[in-house]
Amino acid sequence: MSTLDGHSSSNAISMKSSFSDAPRIGIVTWDFDPPRGGLGRALQEMVHALRERHVHVDVYTVIQTSFFSRLLFSISLLWKLSRWVNRHRIDLLLLPTGPGGLFLMRRLKNCRCIVLSYHTYLQQARYVPGEWWKAIFVPFERHTFNLADSVFCYCEDTQNILRKEYGVRDIRLLPQILEVEPWMSKGVSEQCRCDGSMVRQCSPQAPLIMTHRHYQKHLCLFIGRPDRRKGIHVLWRAWKGVSECLPDAKLRIIQHGDLPQAELIALVQSADLVICPSYLEGFGLVAVEAMAAGTPVIACDSDGIRSLIRHAETGWLVPRGDAIALAQGITRLLMDESLRKRLAVAAQKDVRLRFERQKSVSALLQTVLEIRDSSPD
């Protein structure tokens, strides 16, 4: 990893390539270590996967806490990024843009550039109530796309926006690199209720994980930042209706970092339902992890989510922002255990097939080499 002054920190890892023409990849981001959101978690997984294949990867990052500090970071790249690229002999740069990402101000010399777009400012301004003003950043985002040699995205909705609204020609739709096996918990051999508590018996080498002091029937989870884009206000309105029909239903709000990963996995596995009422997602990491854990998901039919979930087959979708429909969907699922089981089984199977990790890493490497070796426009 590299800091703002361009010097490699002790976390930087240079590994000998397993093939002679391996690219030297640089990633520029503000969200990496520790990850503060889905973008940081996704980039960490990407770096880890590439280094497992013995690809040289350097990360250029600083801790930034606000949009305007990230904008200043983007501006500083005008004179610092080229120096960093040359110092580390980077021949392929990956840069996330859009909400949560950075802007590229000028084209780099002697280095191909791939821009990662999970979702765009145009989508956020169009679909998230009260965030219309973010459309002012669309020109900067468009400029970044124009400077890129290629654009990666992870859902068809964003791909269509990039093609129709931004005029991007070279768009690669890639599978997200995920580590879903821990969520599928092959080591779980037994579930039992004992003295009012739920215990998961893991492999002989692993300790018992106590998910709750007292098992809660009709436990629902919301995992993520409680902000407007995530639809938390829609969930609050919907929950009033759920409580009227099912007074014993429980809702737990969890932000990333509230629990250690093992405890979070155990909690998701023990829940009856995971609720994802977002107006917009770049990918839908929480939904995928819940599906992998065998927990049914109810979500709003929004960009990034509809690419993951087939309604009434691998999950349950309701209209975006519709609190009444969300309440009705939650109530129906909580009252129909057989429906929940059918959705959960189908979703877990689908995730296993779609996000096989080694295939995703191979696809990324193959695409990266194609872009690096292609002739510039």
Image (spheres, rainbow, N blue to C red):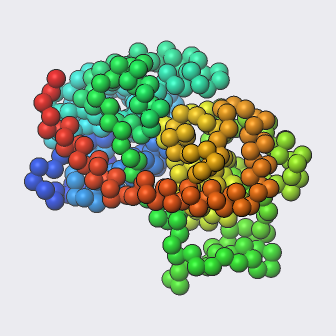
Residue 38 or residue 127, whichever sits in front = 127
Instruction: Identify the residue at the far left of this view.
Output: 20
Residue found at x 16% / y 56%: 17
Count of marks overlaid on the render: 0
Residue 60 or residue 192, whichever sits in front = 192
Q: Is residue 157 left or right of residue 26?
A: right
Residue found at x 71% / y 61%: 338
Residue 181 horizontal/vertical position (percent): 47, 64
Instruction: Identify the residue at the far bottom of this view.
Output: 204
Q: Quadrant of the C terminus?
A: top left
In this picture, is 337 found above or below 26?
below
Residue 259 or residue 289, whichever sits in front = 289
Residue 170 horizontal/vertical position (percent): 28, 29
Q: Is residue 335 left or right of residue 89?
A: right
Residue found at x 86% / y 52%: 246
Q: Is residue 100 left or right of residue 234?
A: left
- Residue 183 seen in the figure: yes
Residue 3 horizontal/vertical position (percent): 33, 41
Q: Is residue 82 left or right of residue 282?
A: left
- Residue 63 seen in the figure: no
In this picture, is 287 found above or below 236?
below
Residue found at x 42% / y 40%: 154
Residue 315 horizontal/vertical position (percent): 62, 49
